[in-house]
Amino acid sequence: MAEQETPGALRSGLEKLGRTFTAKIWRLGFAARFFLYVLLHSGTALRRFGLTIREIYFAGVQSMIIILVSGLFVGMVLALQGYDTLQRYGSSEALGILVALSLVRELGPVVAGLLFASRAGSAITAEIGLMKATEQIAAMEMMAVDPIARVVAPRFWAGVISMPLLAALFSAMGIFGGYLVGVQLIGVDEGAFWSQMQDSVDWREDVMNGVIKSMVFGVAVTWIAVFEGYDAPPTAEGVSGATTRTVVTSSLAILALDFVLTALMFTGGTAK
Amino acid sequence: MKRSTIDIWVGLFVAAGFVGLLFLALRVGNLTFSTAQTYQVQAKFANIGGLKRRAPIKSAGVVVGRVSEVSFDNESYEAIVTFNVDAQYRFPRDTSAKILTSGLLGEQYVGLEAGGDGVMLKQGDRLRLTQSAVVLENLISQFLFNKAAEGKDSKDGK
Amino acid sequence: MLHGVKLRIEPGSVVGVMGQSGCGKTTLLRIIAGWLKASAGSTRVLGEDLAGLGAGGIFRLRRKMGMLFQFGALFTDMTVFDNVAFQMREHTDLPEDLIGDLVMMKLEAVGLRGAAGLMPSELSGGMARRVALARAVALDPQLMLYDEPFTGLDPISLGVIARLIRTLNDSLGQTSIVVSHDVEECFAIVDYVYFVSAGRIVAEGKPAEMRRSGEAFVKQFVRGEPDGPIPFHYPAPGYQADLDGGGALSSLLGVSANG
């Protein structure tokens, strides 16, 4: 009896694994088709830009506070930690470079992306999911208005537009925070701080690449957010599960994409 | 939330974002709107060390241009560095170029020392006198070699 | 799952579709609205065969239809006014002041003109449903579909909604299909009624005929009898066995079958 049960249990375990895997692949395909559909039906969102502007307000403007405050703190911590290490090698003047490059290349896009995913991404998912659960989406379809064009697309474009702006604000605020701690608090030479930074931060290789990263993150996070909202089961648990999935999947996607993009963008520098 | 209030806030947000971007590009980065004319000059070095594109070209400590391209001459096995020099600065044909380091472990840059020739460099000219970068390992081994030779001399007696 | 359903609805009439929850009446409504495709047979709505229509055709047809959802389904991020004005703004190029007049007219018809500036969250259930009704008839559709319009309302609101359904139907020259399981309110306003049970139409006719009907299901439904073709007891194994400690009860309590 026992010998017969083990292979059976193993087999059913593998079956379940296989089913989960194929289910996830199927869902990814569905998500990709949804993404294409949103892009194709974005005409309304762009023609009636007022809709998109409204969503930029809810996604971008209302995230500004958390982005600015977090950026400030991250910059200040970078300066504190950075100074501690650099001054051991007598290179405390490189503090500006350290803070600026860390923020512009990595921390700006990534941390702003994570914050955006948890604040705006989850809100978008919850909103769309609830609209679906309370039949508002169905009502819109009944009134011959395409809900994807009217509800989903404006939110998508709002996220894509807001993300790079938020990342830039994060980095700028962080550098300012680094300046406050490094120059005003610790006493690193102000001139050296800014001039060394300017000498080492290339606007095309560092700043622009950071902006490109944040654009990619914006697309990924907003895509995940609108998809999870639209696909959520129309119940309370369904919407809450979808919101959690948005934050988790977005965060993983940001970190994975960050690795890929960094490998593509920044390791080429030494091979010149 | 009134429509006009939303529009104002979104406008402010986008403006702030662009200001942030500009700050990063101009104040933090090195984006310059130099509409200044430049002329190109080349120089060959045996070793450029860590010299990179956009490294500064300085003369008497003042930045007079930037390195635009670094390439390799497969026949003479030397590095070819192309400079963009500001058009307002004219240098004699026998100007020498040295690769120097700012500080002890800092970034490398090109230092130009003006010669005495009456004829000035023009677009496409090549600098004849160059001095390669100091490679730390060579310096150390040279120092050790000198020290060893000194020791031997004093042992051999004078 | 619907089998062998045949409906013929006279233009200008109010038709009721009644039955237990889950018997298929909502499915019927969704087929008419074009959400579900019938796997067999044909559906002709407003003179057009649904099978031949693509997504664009269905959207076009829906402009002539209106649907009232069970709980109103108002857009929660807009005011009552904006909700009613929604279709006008999306589908027409009417100037704002004309839209304003039309919205006020529709709200007046349902008695909620004074609530135009409120948000849906500030409305009671009955009021929300009336606003949804005003929104659904905003562009004077020819066909109105009502999905359980009487569910969860107090007696006063019930009477109001029922009266509105009939009045709007007659004054706007519409045809209405009301899916419900509220016998009294429904019978008061419909001209003809279909009874659906387990995916089949078991009876049809005028409300007065249905009251006198001898058909078992109709009798049980109309009189609200607890037992009949729809049994009172959910299928279960022997009662004595459960009490003695065997059967399903043992697994629920975690007690072994041998007591």
Image: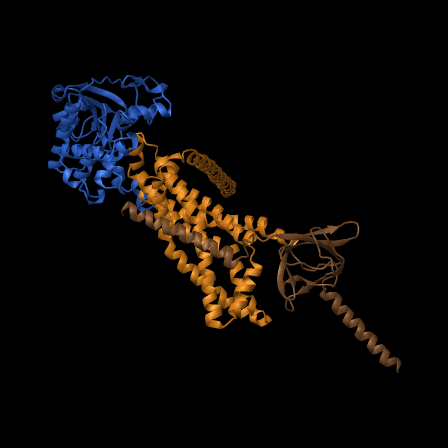
Chain colours: A orange, B brown, C blue
- Closer to the camera in the image, B6 or A85: B6
Q: Is residue A122 above or below residue A176?
A: above
Q: Residue C240 appears at what percent x and percent y? A: 24, 37
Q: Is residue A27 left or right of residue C201?
A: right
Please tell me which residue is depicted at 71% across the width and 55% down the height of the picture: B121
Q: Is residue B6 above or below residue C238?
A: below
Q: Is residue C154 above or below residue C141?
A: below
The image quadrant of residue A101 is bottom right
Q: Residue C186 appears at what percent x and percent y? A: 15, 27
Q: Would residue C150 be visible to someone looking at this image?
A: no
- Closer to the camera in the image, A91 or B35: B35
Count of numbered tags: 0
Q: Residue C180 appears at what percent x and percent y? A: 20, 29
Q: Residue A103 appears at what percent x and percent y? A: 50, 58
- Closer to the camera in the image, A14 or C85: C85
The image quadrant of residue B142 is bottom right
Q: Is residue A217 above or below residue C184?
A: below
Q: Quadrant of the C terminus of chain B?
A: bottom right
The image quadrant of residue C22 is top left
Please tell me which residue is depicted at 32% across the width and 24% down the height of the picture: C60
Q: Would residue A263 be visible to someone looking at this image?
A: yes
